Image (tube, rainbow, N blue to C red):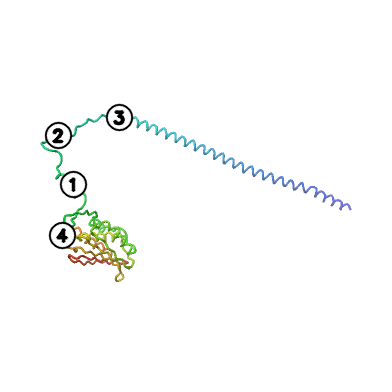
Amino acid sequence: MRSKVQYIFFFVAVILLLPNVLMAQTVMISYESLIQERIIWGGVVSILVVLVIFLEIVRRKQRKISKQSYLAQKEKITFLEAKVRDIEQQKTKPSRVNKPKFEEEVESLVGGSIQPTKQEVLSEMEVEEFTSSRMKGVHGDSLKVVENDDVGELTIMSTHNLGKSKLINPKEFIENTLEEVKPTLPENVSVAVQIGGAPMININQNVFEKAINALIRCSANTIEGNGKITVSLYASMGEAQVSISDNGKGWGYDGQDTDDLKTLDLAKKILKSQGATFDMNTQLGKGTEIVISIPNKK
């Protein structure tokens, strides 16, 4: 009986004390959360304070730099203003010269007019026009300006390996070449294009383009009156072939410009060095056809 009473008292005590224990644990957890929250807020406030201090330091530094720059500019402006005043003070008004009277006095001393004659003016203009560009006779007495120094360019190409060979589309190559050369041709020469199927070609595009452009320009120089140059692209024996034909006087005619003949030799040398073959068929008084066979690999 006594042991049962003890058990009952123990059970009642546990029931009475359990809420207090649970409440104490809850209070402890809440206290720890409060401490953590205060630590976090304290960290945030500290970061904000540091940021504000940093921004204030930067602002003061920029203000100091701006002030120094302003003072330097002000000193420079003051110096320039003083310099301008000194120059204005040193200026003297130039004396006026009666030009007509002066010329009359000079003419009386030399015994003649100092004004250039019409013939002298024309001679000076002709010399200036001739020396400013290379001139070439076309259609008798008419002149045209040759702006392209093909001999010089091809000489450089023949002595220097400029650029590298690469696989390109022959159609695009011909189109780009003609687009570049057409503006350099005289107005009396038209260009016709015939493009057929052709295999890919492996060439140094820069070298080939310069050589073909030079040949087209020289072919145009053989044409008197209205003429035409036909550029054709086609395939033959597994190679791409480019044909340049004209209805001019034919290469090698009497009186042909030596620069054109030099251009022909240089172009042949360059094209052959790139693995191409060069054939030429000319008929005096009828025209010339140049056929260039371009390999698709080297």
Q: Quadrant of residue 93?
A: top left
Marks 2/4: CA distance? 52 Å
Q: Which residue is mark 1?
A: 125
- Alpha carbon of mark 2 to alpha carbon of mark 1: how far? 27 Å
Residue where numbered disc 3 is placed:
88
Which residue in the structure is indicated by mark 4? 255
Q: Residues within 10 Å of mark 2 (few under 14, many from 20)?
A: few
Which residue sits at x=15%, y=61%? 254
Where is residue 224 drawn, in percent x and y?
A: 19, 60
The amino acid type of the residue labelled 2 equals Glu
Judged by depth in the image, the label closer to the viewer, 2 or 3, is 2
Q: Nearer the viewer, mark 2 or mark 1?
A: 2
- Residue in front for this viewpoint, 264 or 281: 281
- The residue indicated by pointer 2 is 104
Question: The residue under label 3 is which amino acid type?
Answer: Glu
Q: Which mark is residue 110?
A: none
Q: Is residue 115 visible?
A: yes
